[in-house]
């Protein structure tokens, strides 16, 4: 049986597609006490202490720990001291299986972990010689308390409190768990796929629910449990404005495509690994994530393929973020962008920026699949090919040809391959920089007039289009197809075929020569069968 390529698999064998936010790891902090000055103001004004010292907040920390212990005793909740290297999720699963009820705190975990906090150091006044305390930031290993929670809307999640001032908080939740509970509430039958959906009687509604999962719902569930759990700040402190805000530490944006059979999934990865082993190179990564990469960009650029059993996992890294693609439970193709630092994309960390991040994450997933698809299905058709390689008149404007094999045209097509994944489009200066790299010239040798000419030619041929209300361009789907066809056809066939002439009367000595001879014979047979003149 002839194996199917990536384009055929994604077009004909997807039975369900779900795009949504997966795991989220959030940081809770009180903005007014994040600096030395803010902490000193809190100690003087709220705790009524004459000097800003960490000794002043020690009773507050002890009271907070006592409130946690009293909360556990009152509700009959176990406090579990985590052992070193123990998997906390395994403990959660064990307690969750024994938990009775639709909502509540399942158990409380306790562990010593590294955290940023304030220390008191002694400083001397250079004029009077008097010693005085001074607050400065540092790290220590205080106790952290994990509240493992089962929520009616969000399912399993945890909220972690640091037991020492300024009492940092971490929140971990899962968008797919929220989705499953919404489907159950609306009586929509579905089959789970581990951390996802395998099948559903109403796929349209599934995607609508995923689109509704946003920062407001996350904020609401955080406030809900913050009001129920022991709080490190007293009510009078909260009334004075000392309230927690949320920021994004890690966010996973996933695209799950359920295939009709496991065999098709194995074919997908066989094709992808053979054709896309270079996805982790800087020039490709900057396209997928739409970010400029230079020698100073701090990242490990590589394509990492991890094989577990017979199904591999593909990892592509960019700075602190990465795209992971793997096969889930033999049915679901999961493409997942994990953003570990929002600053990688010039976006703030506050939760209110989740909308901008999800657009970047979902777009990166789609572009990742687009690269894989077009690598296998980049034919452009005889009529379209002729319209590109010959002069034409478009809307009354004459446009010159893009002759196949021409050095300048190949440089243009390679440039389009680099610019196709720019999230916000590209400017003429971006086009000029990449084109000069492929042409082997410095930007000063390529005038702005020549850049304008090239952009006009590409635009009139339909390979790029201008973005409304801006001076930016973006590559069209037809442009992607043409660019990949021109570059791959020339690089993989014509350049190789003409570099080593084959004499069919002599026995080829190398494997490449034998392959070209076999290809030549196959083409001759095809021509004969079609009864065409050679």
Image: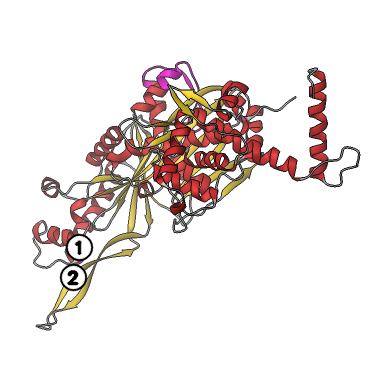
Relative horizontal placement of residue 391, taking residue 210 as reference (left or right): right
Residue 36 is tagged as 1
The foreground one among 297 and 148 is 297
Which badge, 1 or 2, comes first in the chain's sequence? 1
The foreground one among 379 and 49 is 379
Determine the image quadrant of residue 163: bottom left
Where does the image place residue 407, in percent across and percent down from the top left? 59, 43
Count of numbered labels shown in the rendering: 2
Where does the image place residue 448, in percent across and percent down from the top left? 40, 45
Q: Magenta stretch containing residue 186, yes or no?
A: yes
Where does the image place residue 456, in percent across and percent down from the top left? 43, 34
Q: Is residue 512 above or below residue 86?
A: above
Residue 134 is tagged as 2
Q: Is residue 405 above or below residue 391?
A: below
Q: Are marks 1 and 2 in contact (CB under 8 Å)?
A: yes
User: Which portion, as a residue range, is magenta?
Assistant: 185-206
Q: Is residue 347 above or below residue 365?
A: below
Q: Is residue 89 above or below residue 467?
A: below
Mark 2 burial class by Cα count in 10 Å: few <14, some 14-19, many 20+: some
């Amino acid at each position: 049986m002839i194996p199917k390529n990536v384009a055929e698999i994604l077009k004909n064998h997807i039975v369900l597609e779900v795009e949504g936010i997966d795991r989220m790891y959030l940081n809770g902090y009180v903005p007014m006490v994040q600096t030395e000055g803010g902490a000193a103001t809190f100690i003087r004004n709220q705790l009524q202490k004459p000097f800003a010292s960490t000794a002043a907040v020690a009773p507050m920390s002890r009271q907070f720990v006592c409130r946690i212990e009293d909360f556990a005793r009152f509700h009959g909740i176990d406090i579990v001291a985590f052992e070193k290297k123990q998997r906390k999720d395994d403990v959660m699963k064990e307690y969750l299986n024994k938990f009775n009820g639709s909502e509540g705190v399942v158990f409380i975990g306790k562990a010593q972990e590294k955290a940023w906090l304030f220390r008191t150091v002694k400083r001397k006044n250079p004029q009077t010689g008097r010693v005085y305390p001074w607050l400065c930031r540092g790290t220590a290993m205080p106790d952290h308390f994990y509240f493992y929670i089962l929520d009616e809307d969000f399912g399993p999640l945890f909220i972690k409190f640091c037991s020492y001032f300024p009492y940092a908080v971490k929140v971990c939740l899962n968008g797919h768990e929220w989705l499953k509970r919404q489907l159950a509430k609306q009586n929509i039958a579905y089959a789970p796929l581990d951390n996802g959906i395998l099948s559903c009687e109403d796929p349209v509604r599934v995607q609508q629910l995923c689109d509704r999962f946003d920062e407001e719902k996350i904020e609401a569930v955080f406030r809900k449990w913050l009001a129920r759990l022991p709080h490190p700040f007293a009510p009078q402190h909260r009334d004075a404005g000392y309230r927690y805000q949320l920021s994004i530490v890690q966010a996973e944006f996933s695209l799950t495509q359920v295939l009709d059979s496991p065999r098709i999934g194995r074919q997908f990865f066989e094709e992808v690994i053979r054709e896309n082993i270079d996805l982790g190179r800087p020039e490709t990564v900057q396209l997928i994530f739409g970010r400029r990469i230079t020698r100073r960009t701090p990242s490990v650029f590589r394509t990492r393929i991890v094989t577990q059993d017979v199904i591999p996992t593909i990892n592509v890294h960019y700075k602190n973020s990465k795209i992971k693609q793997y096969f889930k439970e033999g049915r679901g193709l999961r493409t997942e962008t994990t953003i570990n630092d929002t600053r990688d994309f010039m976006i703030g960390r506050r939760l209110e920026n989740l909308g901008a991040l999800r657009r970047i994450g979902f777009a990166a997933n789609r572009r990742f699949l687009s690269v894989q698809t077009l690598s296998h299905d980049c034919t452009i058709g005889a009529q379209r090919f002729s319209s590109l390689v010959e002069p034409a008149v478009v809307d009354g404007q004459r446009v010159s040809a893009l002759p196949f094999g021409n050095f300048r045209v190949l440089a243009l097509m390679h440039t389009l391959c680099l610019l196709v994944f720019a999230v916000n489009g590209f400017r003429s200066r971006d086009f000029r920089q990449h084109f000069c790299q492929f042409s082997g010239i410095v930007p000063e040798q390529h005038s702005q007039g020549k850049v304008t000419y090239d952009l006009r030619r590409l635009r009139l041929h339909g390979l790029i289009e201008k973005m409304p209300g801006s001076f930016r361009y973006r590559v069209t789907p037809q442009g992607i197809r043409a660019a990949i066809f021109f570059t791959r056809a020339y690089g993989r066939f014509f350049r190789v075929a003409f570099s080593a002439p084959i004499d069919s009367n002599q026995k080829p000595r190398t494997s490449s020569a034998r392959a070209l001879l076999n290809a030549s014979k196959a083409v001759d047979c095809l021509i004969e069968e079609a009864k065409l003149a050679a």
